[in-house]
Amino acid sequence: SPTGYGDSPYQSFSTYAGNPLIIDIDMLFRDGWLDEEQTIPPNDIHVSSRVDFGKVVEWKIPLLKTAAQQFLSRAKPEDRVHYEAFKNDNASWLDNYAIFMSIKEVYDAKAKAENIWGAMWSNYWPKELASHDPKAVSKWHETHVIECETQKVIQFFFFTQWNALKEYANNEGISIIGDVPIFVAADSADVWANQHLFQLSNDGKLLAVAGVPPDYFSETGQLWGNPLYNWDAHKKEGYKWWLDRIKALLKMVDFVRIDHFRGFEAYWSVPAGEKTAVNGKWIPGPNHDLFMAIKNELGDIPVIAEDLGLITDAVKKLRDDFELPGMKILQFAFDTNEAGKGGFTNTFLPHTYDKNCVVYTGSHDNATMQGWLDAATKDEIQLIGEYLGFEKNDIENFAKNGKLCEGLVRLAFSSTANFAVIPLQDIFALNNEARMNLPSTIGGINWQWRMEKKHYDKEKAAWLKKLGMLYGRNIRN
């Protein structure tokens, strides 16, 4: 999805649209929509392990618009047939998205010129546009047809390339896991076009926002700031918005990881305007009702439930009643306080797993495994080493040279979990300079890491292949 505030995939302008920054410029040149010299990035955009989104956006978005306008002016009849089919197939979201983005560009530029920060549709756009008045929206479209069509063509580019990539991956026996953030961004086409489905005032202002109470990641909780759903309105419509969302994602991916699964049983509601998430309260969610609607419409879909955080018996029941696999994070497994209990029974330890789960060395919210080991106590390091069967005298050195990290990757592969997910950072035993996200923070290094060519290692690839063979994870179904 196209990222917004803080470059976060959890703050997207649309839950349906593809991120334009992923579009391959070289392929647009190959298809004839750009000249070769246009594909050369400026000197201040360097290929490194950290993406400078600001510079990339400044260069790439105008280039994509140029390519889109070239398409609109001289596409061949067969290209136009595919484009029209794409628009028809995605009209339920594409029209609103294109109009939203065209309005947003105009008023974001105006707000910037006036030195106004934090402007968005609900607090800056003209009232008739902010309220999604059909006549006003239609009039805008009539007077900004080229801008709206440009947005649609850019999405056409994205999905054409994505579908080709997915087909190639699937043919090679590779499945793709997609993430469904439970909440959407306030500054999004989703909320703007469906205001009755969210907890908003009559003028579109947030009444309460999403977050989680204090936990492992933050002493003051996490204040996400996303609008909360009006679940009564969703229920009256048969959860159509959610059904459409899941259907759209399943066209793009093979498995769906539902973020913050516990929020469907009960969600943490924080009054709008609070500085932290401390003063929130639990509010019942749709619970079984939503998932029964999904099951009735789509059958048994390939879902992974992100069941981390404060997980109650009611959340476990919701997960288990629909036989959804939960997540196991190895970084949460090694609790030295259990030593006095006569046995280690932490449910994140592999010897406690049922098969119907997915084990991760760490998620995008965790430190890298090596970064976590670097900060671990001596007792924790010893416990991990002993669990892995390493000689006591070797454990401390193994924690520093990456061997302990490799052992934990092997542990995930060898577990009984149906699936094992290993972040690239952990495969290469990279430290926290390669961390993906630090919860409760904005900017900094968040969401910037990417793998470089220098990380590719044939020996490491052979090692992974061997692990897959040893533990039966290379078998194609």
Image (tube, helix red, strand yellow):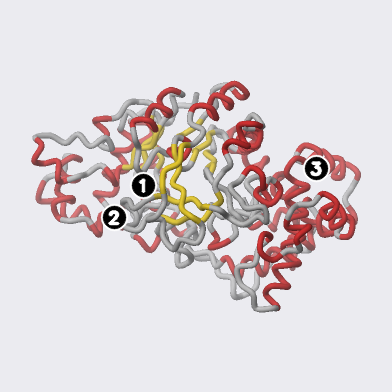
**Where residue 59 sits in the image (x, y, percent)?**
67, 68
Q: Are marks 1 and 2 in contact (CB under 8 Å)?
A: yes
Give the residue type at disc 3.
Answer: Lys
**Where residue 243 sits in the image (x, y, percent)?**
63, 32
Q: Is residue 3 toward the left or the right of residue 340 in the image?
A: right
Give the residue drawn at x 78%, y 58%: 128
Give the residue type at disc 2.
Answer: Trp
Give the residue drawn at x 58%, y 41%: 230
Residue under circle 2?
372
Regarding residue 174, the answer to whether it shows in the image is no
**Where residue 209 sits in the image (x, y, percent)?**
51, 53
Give the residue type at disc 1.
Answer: Gly
Give the residue drawn at x 19%, y 34%: 345
Q: Who comes first in sequence, dot 1 or dot 2?
A: 1
Q: Who comes first in sequence, dot 3 or dot 1?
A: 3
Query: Secondary structure beneath disc 2?
Result: helix
Query: Secondary structure beneath disc 3?
Result: helix
Q: How many callouts does the rendering have?
A: 3
Q: Who comes first in sequence, dot 2 or dot 3?
A: 3
**Where residue 84 sits in the image (x, y, percent)?**
84, 42
282 w.r.t. 455: above or below: above
